[in-house]
Image (tube, rainbow, N blue to C red):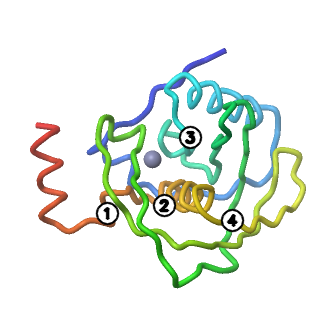
Amino acid sequence: MTILKILKYPDKRLNIIAKPIKNINNKIKNLIFNMLNTMYAYNGIGLSATQINKHLRIFVMDISKTYNQPIIIVNPKYNFVSNKYKKFKEGCLSIPYYFEYIYRSININLNAIDINGNNIIINAYGLISQCIQHEIDHLNGKLLIDHLSQQKKKKIYKIKD
Ligand SMILES: [Zn+2]
């Protein structure tokens, strides 16, 4: 079991756009396993490959109350993003001890592949929708604070300095 190092804001590598996975070989499966271990070790509900400095389109989540129902998403692609929004309080393992209210679409629909390479369609609402949007943002080099005004962003820099 390996706990991977998580990149922290303002590390520029968090802004790299991740590349799609061509095939899920054992190396990728091992990476996913370690991502899950890392997410659980830090009590996160989601972790993208970007955050552990692997720039591949993979993320893992677990939003269950029992915290033993991992969800693995590879090569996600939006089919639909609702233009109805809800404010959610959000944190990120790459910005420790920071929480902010972010507007997220209440409903999304996406194509992806699972760990066995099967095509899956996900229709998500509420917390899971919020979490997926947060993780896909990571794969696109975007952080939750990129949803904030410049003034609020500057304040975070001050906290980090
Ligand atoms: Zn995050």
Q: Is tag 4's residue or tag 1's residue first in the polypeptide sequence?
A: 4
How far apart, in angstroms, are the residues tagged by discs 3 and 2? 15 Å
Asked if ligand 1 lies within 8 A of label 2, the reply is yes
Q: Secondary structure at mark 3?
A: loop
| Amino acid bearing label 3 | Ile
Image quadrant containing the N terminus: top right
The tag earlier along the polypeptide, 1 or 3, is 3
Percent position (x, y) of residue 121?
81, 66
Proximity of marks 4 and 1: CB atoms separated by less than 8 Å? no
Position of 161 with respect to 51 (left or right) is left
| Precedes in sequence: disc 2 or disc 4 | 4
Position of 69 with respect to 89 (left or right) is right
Q: Which residue is mark 3?
A: 45
**Which residue was labeled with disc 1?**
146
Q: Nearer the viewer, residue 127 or 38?
A: 127
List the residue tagged with mark 4. Answer: 124
Name the residue type under label 1: Asp
Question: What's the amino acid at mark 2?
Answer: Asp
Q: Which residue is mark 2?
A: 137
| Mark 2 vs 4: CB contact within 8 A | no
Front one among 139 and 100: 100
Q: Position of residue 126 (x, y in %)?
A: 59, 62
Please tell me whether mark 2 or mark 4 is closer to you in this view: 4
**Farthest front residue?**
65
**Number of on-image labels:** 4
Q: Secondary structure at mark 4?
A: strand
- Along the viewing direction, whichever of 111 and 25 lies nearer the viewer: 111
Query: Counting residues from the N terminus, which is met first, the one under dot 4 or under dot 3?
Result: 3
Report if the CB atoms under discs 2 and 1 are less than 8 Å apart: yes
Please tell me how crowded label 4 is: few (under 14), some (14-19), or many (20+) other residues with Cα within 10 Å. Answer: some
